[in-house]
Amino acid sequence: MLLRVVFLVTLALVCNHVGKIVYMSGLFKVVYNQHPGPCRIVPGIEKGSEDVTVSNNGLAFISSELNGRTDVAVDPTRKPPNIRGKIFLFDFNHPENNVIELPMKGDIDRDRFYPHGISLYEDPKTDEKRLFVVNHRASGDESIEVFRFEEKTKSLLHLKTVRGDNIYRVNDVVAVGPDSFYFTNDKYFVASEFLRQVEVFADLAWANVGFYDGKTDMIVKSGFHYANGINVSPDGRYLYVASITKGIIFVFEIMKDNSLEEKKRINVYSGVDNIEVDKKTGDLWLGCHAVLYQFARHEQNVTRSAPSHVLRIHFGSKSAPYDKVDIHQVLMDDGSFLKGSSVASYYDNKMLVGTVVDKLGFCEIKHL
């Protein structure tokens, strides 16, 4: 009798876990095509536009050619030395000009530069623009590179490299000061791809969020399933963190000591990757993977298609943006236009949609 009870309980737990994995993968999700207006591919980017961040005056910075990790894009044409990390610039005020690659000056090793998440800090007093870039120099050798954007020459001046014991599996970064930032470590294991897969499929909540105050890096919140995109509200009061495998946005209040107090979890029912914030309205723009298992196959073989999905979150109150939440689907695409959307950035009724290893899309927002 006892053995039978143990067997049935074990079977129930296994079935429950398998059910979670199937739901997480998006196996039964229906994908259709819905665009917010005229959309086109932006020429000049062929090997990824993983993250996009926009300045107050409509300049979009784009990280491209991510490949510092062995678990991304096994296609040999996308491995060093056939791929080299780049930062592109797109001007929303003149979208017809498409993109330009930003040259880099200063002490930066271009052969070990593979950008992932990026964040722009604009000094309210001097208008200086600092770009913070997650750099996968090599497996287990992560850093945050800090650049100053030279607007006159359209170039990036490298200021410093930030490394630390807690900066070990970084996915995204958000600057909250000229020298300070929050960041996500998307997994706990670093060296072993097998253990990273175990971490995901065993549904282990071992990812975390860290903070760097200009001198010291520290972990400020743990217990995430695959922590991914991260961003901050326009007033600097709230921090948003995405869990891609759970399809959840965590809303935290930033305390005076830079610790985080959870206020809300928003289920968006899609594999949310990066989070961008409209500086005027505080709306969140989410680049998502509607069907995660298809994106995983696409990431390993770029000829395979994967859907793209963009959502917008509008908060009902500026004083307590976690009280009332409206989620709106902006774009869904079966991969015929754009494969594997990782980010969506909005400015003046226009939108850029980036991808992990594919191209860059531009859409006019005619209806929401």
Image (cartoon, grey):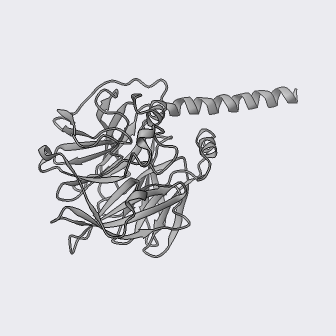
Rendered residue at 30%/40% (across/down): 46
- Location of residue 262 in the rendering, given as x and y in whole percent from the top left corner: 48, 57
Q: Is residue 89 visible?
A: yes
Q: Is residue 173 left or right of residue 205?
A: left
- Foreground residue, 97 or 255? 97
In-front residue for pair 194/108: 108
* 46 over 162 or under it: above or below: above
Q: Is any part of residue 315 visible from this angle?
A: no
- Residue in the picture at 81% in, 31% down: 6
For the C terminus, give its image quadrant: top left
Tell me which corner region of the image, top left, top right, bottom left or bottom right, holds residue 238.
Answer: bottom left
Q: Position of residue 179 (x, y in %)?
A: 37, 72
Q: Is residue 323 above or below residue 219?
A: above
Q: Is residue 5 above or below residue 74?
A: above
Query: Where residue 294 sits in the image (x, y, percent)?
Result: 45, 30
Q: Point out the residue furthest to the right here.
A: 1
Q: Quadrant of the N terminus?
A: top right
- Along the line of sight, the residue nearer the viewer: 76 or 62: 76
